[in-house]
Amino acid sequence: MRKVLILLNFIFFTIILLYSINQKEELITNGEKLILRLAPVDPRSLMQGDYMRLDFNIAREIAKCRPKDTYQFSTHQAIIKLDERGVATFVSLYTRELQEDEKILSFKATRRNITIVTDAWFFQEGEAQRFQKARYGEFRILADGKALLVGMLDEKLLAIK
């Protein structure tokens, strides 16, 4: 009986894992390109081991607009506009109908932070110097506001590989 329960747990978690992977792959394949400007972070924390701490300008703009006593560990949405290069600017919190040229961007909020998708970019050990040139994050976004960080871009919006 114990072996059966272990096998069923394994199958259950494998199905969940495969479903999650499939959702991310679909987002990468079908999502629209979205670029967010990186905000400066504490330089002592910019590069730590094999990841880079991230913050985005748009998160700081969202933080200025939200009530300070709400959004504890919850997901919300903002309205953004993309320029001709795909760089997003914050319009407002999502409280009204979208205009034709606007999109929804989901974010997570706590009392202290606004997080757009993630707050870290992981890379191979020894590659930190290459990623110090990063000025933008490249995302794929769906119409419902779900986004996924897929790469880092330099000042000229060229992929850092």
Image: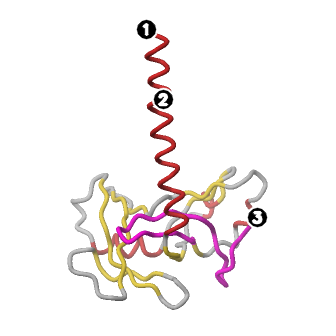
| Residue 149 as seen in the image, left or right of residue 76 | right
Structural crowding at the residue carrying mark 3, measured as other residues with C-alpha within 10 Å and reported as few (<14), some (14–19) or many (≥20): few
For residue 99, side relative to residue 85 (left or right): left
Residue 129: mark in rendering: 3
Residue at the extreme bottom of the image, as rendered: 84
Check disc 1 and give the amino acid type: Met
Label 1 element class: loop
Q: Does 147 appear in magenta?
A: yes
Here the colouring is secondary structure
Residues under labels 3 and 1: Cα distance? 53 Å
Tell me which numbered mark, 1 or 2, is placed earlier along the sequence: 1
Label 1 CA crowd tier, 10 Å (few <14, some 14–19, many 20+): few
Q: Nearer the viewer, residue 48 or 32?
A: 32
Residue 21 higher or lower than 90, as above or below: above
Seen in the image, is 48 located left or right of residue 116? right
- Read off the residue under disc 2: 11
Mark 2: amino acid: Ile
- Bounds of the magenta span? 137-161
